[in-house]
Image (tube, coloured by chain):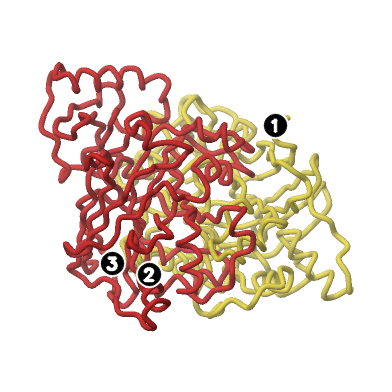
Chain colours: A red, B yellow
Amino acid sequence: MKLATLRSTSPDGRLIVVSRDLRKAVDAAAIAPSLRQAIEQWDLVAPALQALSDRLNTGDASGAFDFDTTACAAPLPRCFQWCDASAFLNHGRLMERAFKTEPIPDFDTIPVMYQGASDDFLGPHDDVPLPDESLGIDFEGEFGVVVDHVEMGASPLAALERVLLLVQINDWSLRALGPREMKSGFGFLQAKPSTSFAPVAITPDELGADWRGGRVRLDLHVQWNDAWFGQPNGGEMNFDFGELIAHAARTRRLGAGTIIGSGTVSNANRAAGSACIAERRVIEMLDQGDIKTAFMRFGDRVRMEARNAEGIAPFGVVDQRVVRAGL
Amino acid sequence: MKLATLRSTSPDGRLIVVSRDLRKAVDAAAIAPSLRQAIEQWDLVAPALQALSDRLNTGDASGAFDFDTTACAAPLPRCFQWCDASAFLNHGRLMERAFKTEPIPDFDTIPVMYQGASDDFLGPHDDVPLPDESLGIDFEGEFGVVVDHVEMGASPLAALERVLLLVQINDWSLRALGPREMKSGFGFLQAKPSTSFAPVAITPDELGADWRGGRVRLDLHVQWNDAWFGQPNGGEMNFDFGELIAHAARTRRLGAGTIIGSGTVSNANRAAGSACIAERRVIEMLDQGDIKTAFMRFGDRVRMEARNAEGIAPFGVVDQRVVRAGL
């Protein structure tokens, strides 16, 4: 099934079920007021949500209305935990060269992952307020999973079974602030402003064979100001989501509703383009001898949409504009 | 006023008001079901909580009962954001020597801060389950603030005015995992298992002159297995809490209920002892030529209690035992 969240007076928004073709939706707040609360009692509410989804998809849901993604918040406008990996080693190795940082120890065998801010996620068409163009404004196209609670020490296989929903993410990054925070050893904080989400969270069965081996095997189409920027495929992820969840749960249990991200989708084939500017810049430096692409300016837009072989976008579109904060 | 949270069927627990002397408490769930929800509508509910607190302190609250900290969860058993600084430079400089890491750039002028996990905090007497004694199990005694929502770019002064509550924290750390995660540049993740809290969160006025200049000016008494370990004073913090909150809010707004931590309390005067084992170990190495103190073993306890000049502990006591996970 497909779920989304309408902005409402609650900071958690209001839960709706969305039809498979993203054309229709129906209020689900009678089953659970918000997606956050649905996830916290998933076994209890999932059957009713599935039944409502079935009725919506057969045209039998009373109260169905046209699905309008401009009314959507992030599927989870906030949650209690957001951990983001860098599971595409092609991206990570390029970024080491971009940031001129030391190679990360055991990068091929142990995932790297940072703890992100989860108190204030942006919706698919929300403006992205940032304080200063000089901070190196960049996007990062990613996939993620929303998990049920996970026991400490769960195996990758057990962890993968805890996946409830898949999501599509734009992990905004401020590149001028990243290297200092990496060198501090304390990791990203100011370098990672509020993260954005495509409107629709989906159960893994919605992807069919495109969810396989703990990976979202879709091309993530990225456009910057209407120009093609890349379409790397999520199948090339070097650690699967089970391994990433297990990494996060090695020394602590994870609360229900924890989101685990893949890190920037990236393919070894350069014809696939990139899902972030920093990666394109280092490729320009390596292949052409100097950097040609600048970071984003206020007023710029970026659009991301994962599509399957039939051209269908199961998560919908995240399409946002960067603006100066406080205006 | 003083607030605490009883364990309940809700993951957020049940809100109670606690008397100034920590002897009595009264249920406050009719005002707000949980402290998390109270903080999200603070202006609306604070007057009623204050009135209940006043009645409790004059012996006029109906339904008052004996305050039992063993029934307490953390004041916020979970929240949407937890950011922890390293604002005592004495500690930070010693830790650089302990971890043999490079000096952090601008360490004296820009706070360092990591994003922590906020989905699963431990209560003051909860056992602390960890997978393996060999991970270098350590405690870190700290103070923290719970803030109302904070605008992006708030000044330190404006940020300080957003402080709603003060808390006392044990930020559990796994020292064997820290250096690798620091070298990755992505910061602490496995090295920071669930954080623990003293039972009582207090409004700043409860401290009188011991809350001054954005610092909690109390000695933090630390005992490890009943032996004195340290009593450093929180007044020596090199950045005040306003500066720490503003640092976190430089590139994003902060949601109501965000907790900002001071990092390990640490004093230049070595007679004050330490609030974590790693710091004592590096002092032993520097002053005595080799490390004498090992990290914690399963079954060990640590007790922390901030006390004022009259010996009163406004936050109560956090006293926990480390156990093997899964037993």
Percent of width and height locating residue B1: 47, 46
Contact check, label 3 and label 2, Cβ < 8 Å: no
Q: Which quadrant is the C terminus of chain B positioned in? A: top right
Q: x, y (%) of residue A201?
A: 31, 37
Q: In percent of the image, x 40 and y 70: which residue is there?
A: B156
Residue B326: which numbered mark, if any?
A: 1
The image quarter containing residue A48 is: top left
Q: Residue A134's image quarter?
A: bottom left
Q: Amino acid at mark 2?
A: Ala
**For residue A130, which numbered disc appears in the image?**
3
Ranked by sequence position, the earlier of labels 3 and 2 is 3
Q: Nearer the viewer, mark 3 or mark 2?
A: 2
Question: A211 left or right of B130?
Answer: left
Label 1, secondary structure: give it.
loop
Q: Amino acid at mark 1?
A: Gly
- The Cα–Cα distance between marks 3 and 2, rounded to whole angstroms, is 18 Å
Between disc 1 and disc 2, the foreground one is 2
Q: SS at mark 2?
A: helix
Is A150 or B55 nearer to us in this picture? Answer: A150
- Asked which secondary structure carries label 3, the reply is strand
- Badge 2: how crowded within 10 Å, few (<14), some, or many (20+)? many
Does residue A225 show up? yes
- Give A243 or B7, whichever is nearer the viewer: A243
Residue B319 drawn at (x, y percent): 70, 43
Give the camera-side residue of B233 and A109. Answer: A109
Query: In the image, are marks 3 and 1 on the same chain?
Result: no
Image quadrant assignment for residue B21 = top right
Residue at numbered disc 2: A278
